[in-house]
Image (cartoon, rainbow, N blue to C red):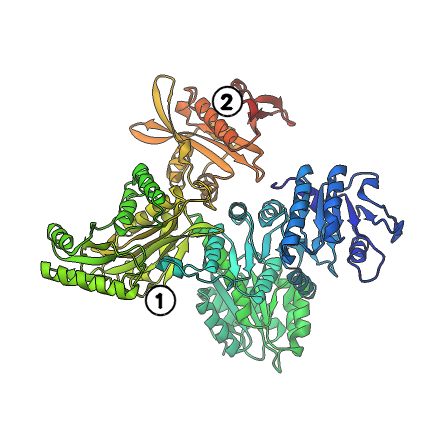
Amino acid sequence: MGLYNLDKIFKPESVAVIGASRKQGSIGLALMENLTEGGYEGRIIPVNPNYSEIMGLRTYKSVSEVDGQIDLAVIATPISTVQEIVKECVGTGVGGAIVISAGGRETGEEGRKLEEQIENEARKGGLRIIGPNCMGLIRPDLRLNASFAAHMPPEGKIAFISQSGAICSAMLDLSLKENMGFRHFVSIGAMLDVDFGDLIDYLGTDPEVRSILLYIESLTHFRKFMSAARAVSRVKPIVVLKSGKGKAGARAAASHTGAIAGQDSVYDTAFKRAGAVRVDTLEDFFDCAELLAKQPPPLGPQLVVITNAGGPGVMAADAIEEYGLQLSPLGEETKNRLNHILPPHWSRGNPIDILGDATPERYVEAADCCFEARDIHGMLIIINPQAMTNPTEVAQALAQGLRERPYPVFTALMGGVDVEEGREVMNQEGIPTYDTPERALRSFMSLHNYAENLKMLQEIPSRLPQEVEPDEDEARSLIKKALEKEEDFLSEVDSKRLLSFYGIPVNRTEAAGSVEEAVDLASRMGYPVVMKVLSPDISHKTEAGGVITDLRSHEEVREAYAKVMEGAKGYKPDAEILGVTLQSMIAKPEVELLVGAIKDANFGPVILFGLGGVFAEILGDKNMGLPPLNRSLARRLMEKTKVYTLLQGYRNIPAADMGLLEQLLMCLSHLLVDFPEIAEMDMNPVVVKDGKPCAVDARVLVKKPEVPSPHHLVISPYPDQYEFKEVISGDVEIFIRPIKPEDAPMLVELFNSLSFQSRYYRFMGPMKTLSNDLLVQLTQIDYDRHIALVALGDVEGEEKILAVARVIAGPDREEAEFSVVVRDVWQGKGVGTRLLEKILGVAKEYGIKTVHGIVLAENTQMLQLARDLGFEVSRGRGGNEYQLSIDLEGFPT
């Protein structure tokens, strides 16, 4: 149900506690005490038929007896009673509910049925539910503690969402010790209704939320989660701790791809594509939380380290190198300043060793020198208790001067009892404190990795020199025939045919059912050839002795055929042997790659790339990515492998044609987008010879899909169904299609061609240039919630963008905002009208009900266009603008 009614849960003006109690040790009493003693200023309404008054408040026997509106109901009764309570809440118009009650699906089938009944009742009236089996939520700024947690954390900028009540309790306790502030603190429980995707969308739009922390045990509505995380992570860090890493592991599979791609690796891949940073341990999760709660995210990898002990400084330097960070070089000006304030024997480099007799004043002066230096993205201050250094006095001297710096400043106070008071001083001043340099630097590294990953995801991809036009009809026919014959595995010949239909280079491969056919085929193909066993039951041909290379004569082909048959029967006696395949041999390739795909039960198709050959599974050099891919994403997929170094050229190995490899991965992505029937695919090896890739072995597993394309994907692909050829006034043909990331240069050219007036009308103010961030937002869109159509036509002999129209929907996809801009010389020729008609039709198909926008009063041409299309036009509050709105129910499609 999206974000509907979540305001009633997070900003309630009245809270009913159903199951309120006076019994010591009960959750009902804890909820009442937290609400009343926490300072919540809204109305608190106890509901319990056994009491007439609790904590001085009138207590109602049921929700239906309450006079006045209830925004939020907190239900703490046995789960067997919750269905009727929810039904009553729906009947009285309650906005939202937190179901504390346990005993749902975690107890088995009976509990699952109870949850289904509760969900069905809630949906009848649009009642939003957090839980069941949760702790509740806390809003420190509203003094709202609608939970049974023992304390309320300090007020801050973090939104924390956890499936585990125990993790909530631990984070809450840590927040009090370390003075970490939170904006929202949510125990999400079993996610009967409100899930991670809903909360990321909702809390991500809160301007007071600076970052989001997620503790995840399981996900639901994976596509919604990915869409929400991709949208919010562009502007706010999302840190994830996902447990259950070893539950599934790498499953037994029919290919190298399936064997290598474990479930947790797919989660890793998804989090990276969503722009979130994943940490591996609770320690790292808590440490990142502290850094985010107190400091801005890092803008780069370069750190300066100030220490009063050489050993810890060396440890910090080692960790910086290990974590892929950098020690910031000290400029001559900075060194000269430090020479004036430090003893002659200081380290004269970074780490800055200010020596064991460092006074509080020396620490402050050294830090001040570094704050004036350039090219520093973070500062680590190490305080080691020594005879001449009092950690508490150092912390007191430093604390205030470290606040509100443009980059993260954090400390490592090493030791136990002697540094406790110093840690407390730093915590109270909002400075992150850690007990070792390594812990401090791991937190910085995690947040730096978030920023770097975001840069990569937002990189503007270039166009391929030549677009590949796939033969979708032939591919569909081949897959359909295999499914009709109930053949799960395509033969190697058919697998390669399928790949070739989508532009993936393969070598010529043909089948032979007998030794004589094999000899005849080899003579026609030309020697040397490779022979492979042809069997749907043998996945790894090499293991079965089913691959023989470099055959150069009829006699060698005969001998090889006999060996292959003997080896296959010995390897798997009950295997169906159809014969062999013969293919032209590519001798001495520079590199062997593994390229494959597997359909994950939760995230859909996943692409795998890495080192190939017989040792692929042992060496495990691989990286994974989610389709759809563009050219930049294809390159990043390869860059995170060790074999990528070989592909760049290494010693006597020439460089591969990276453009062709990028194209191969994009073609594979396109194939997976179009065909949810592909359950598993293996190209091992893809050999690189003379720089060019070629799949010399391929195996494809097909199954009848549960959903049609593109619903099998967690990331909405380019919607090519919205491509139109149109004729406008003067018999001019234009091409209308969704915008692509590769359109960024054309969009810049369009912007530069616009007059000052056209820019002013479109952006509601003067704008001289398109920033890179804005350009990314306008071209790298989430097609699930953002529709942008471009009209392409001829401008002075080149194809250029004539106009752009957008409809950007909220997460609920019920209302959306529109905009349109037309190249000046094409205004008044019908381009804008046709484009706006098309995009409103697409919006209606999306299920969007209302589209609205704002137009300046002097933009009379746009106002007339809106009236012609059926928009309602009304004056805005300021008088210099108009509000436009259209109900799409009656709009023609």
Front residue of this view, candidates 733 and 148:
148
Question: x%, y% of residue 344?
Answer: 50, 78
Q: Give the image quarter of residue 562.
A: bottom left
Instruction: Determine if residue 579 is in view.
Output: yes
Query: Answer yes or no: do the residues labelled 2 and 1 have beta carbons within 8 Å?
Result: no
The x, y position of residue 158, in whole percent, is 63, 54
Q: Tag on residue 66?
A: none
Q: Residue at x 56, y 79 (%)?
A: 356
* Amino acid of disc 2: Pro
- The spot of residue 723 in percent (x, y) is 39, 31
Residue lying at the far front of the rendered structure: 574
Specify whether 700 is left or right of 22.
left
Q: Residue furthest bottom?
A: 387
Relative depth, front residue between 645 and 266: 266
Front residue of 132/396: it is 132
Q: Which residue is mark 1?
A: 619
Using residue 486 as the reference point, say whether residue 886 is left or right of it. right
Q: Rounded to the nearest whole Å, what is the CA distance between mark 2 and mark 1?
A: 57 Å
Q: Residues within 10 Å of mark 2 (few under 14, many from 20)?
A: few
Q: Residue at x 70, y 45 (%)?
A: 9
From the viewer's perspective, tell me whether residue 836 is left or right of residue 742: right
Residue 158 visible here = no
Q: Amino acid at mark 1?
A: Leu
Q: Of label 2 and label 1, which has the lower sequence position?
A: 1
The percent position of residue 838, horizontal first and vertical second, equals 46, 26
Q: Which residue is mark 2?
A: 892
* Above or below 68: residue 839: above
